Image (cartoon, helix red, strand yellow):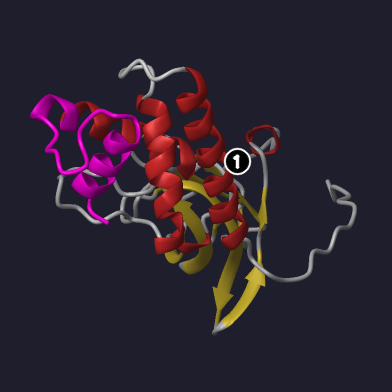
Amino acid sequence: MTTIEIIKDALILIGGIEDEGTPTSSQEDYAKRALNRMTKAWSVKGLKIWLEQEHTLPLIASTATYTLSAINRPTRIYNVRKVLDSVETPVRIVTRQEYMNQPSKESEGKPVFVYYDSQIPDGIMYVWPTPDAADNLKFTFKSYLEDFDNLSDDAHFPSEWLDAIVYNLAYRLCPKYEVSGEDRRTIREQSIVYLEEAEDADMEQGSLYIEPYIDEY
């Protein structure tokens, strides 16, 4: 579905337009802004497996800080690995506090952990110790969903998310169109059901192993 198709269906649900009606430009603009706010909020909620991407970061000797400007700003990174002669070794991800607690951030050696700071406009990765030679890091990351910039843009979602998008947008538009009572409750209930169904389909299958972490420092 395109942006305008999503907007039309949401407006029809709340009586903003007739079944065969055409939204005004102000209706389109308002609904598009609401749609983008909604999907931005969803970018940091849940798994969104289809947003997972891999990236290789070249490390430079004596350089500890890397701005990730070559990719869309990650909302989070995980599964970081150091690559040497095609062999990948896990690298720990630490919190800001753990990184800041390191007494000598200019110490050089083979990286053992990283700290990721999700800054705007580009995220920043800090590596410790500072690499003593050129190397590579690989990591998995999730980024924000693409904006609905134009009315002809396709939704950056799998098809099983379309009902969730339409109904949740309709619910967000209810106050604007003074939808209340039973009609509003019905839209809200459906928006919750469709979102839960979409998120259930987004679950990654596999085993989960939990073990205590003991800080070696």
Please tell me how many numbered marks the rendered image carries.
1
Q: Vertical placement of 178 versus 96: above or below? A: above
Q: SS class of the residue under badge 1?
A: loop
Q: Does the magenta stretch include residue 165?
A: no
Residue type, numbered disc 1: Lys
Image quadrant of residue 179?
top left
Residue at (46% x, 27% y) in the render:
183
Question: Where does the magenta region start and end?
Answer: 1-28
Q: Is residue 96 visible?
A: yes
Q: Is residue 16 magenta?
A: yes
Give the percent coordinates (x, y) of residue 18: 20, 35
Q: Is residue 115 visible?
A: no
Q: How crowded is mark 1: few (under 14 residues within 10 Å), some or many (20 or more)?
A: some
Residue at (89% x, 50% y) in the render:
214
Q: Vertical placement of 27 versus 194: above or below? A: above
Give the percent coordinates (x, y) of residue 90: 67, 67
The residue that mark 1 highlights is 105
Q: Vertical placement of 56 versus 18: above or below? A: below
123 on left or right of 17? right
215 on left or right of 145? right
215 on left or right of 147? right
Give the percent coordinates (x, y) of residue 14: 34, 30
Q: Is the N terminus in the top left, top right, bottom left or bottom right quadrant?
A: bottom left
| Front one among 126 and 144 | 144
| Front one among 15 and 4 | 15
Residue at (37% x, 33% y) in the render:
170
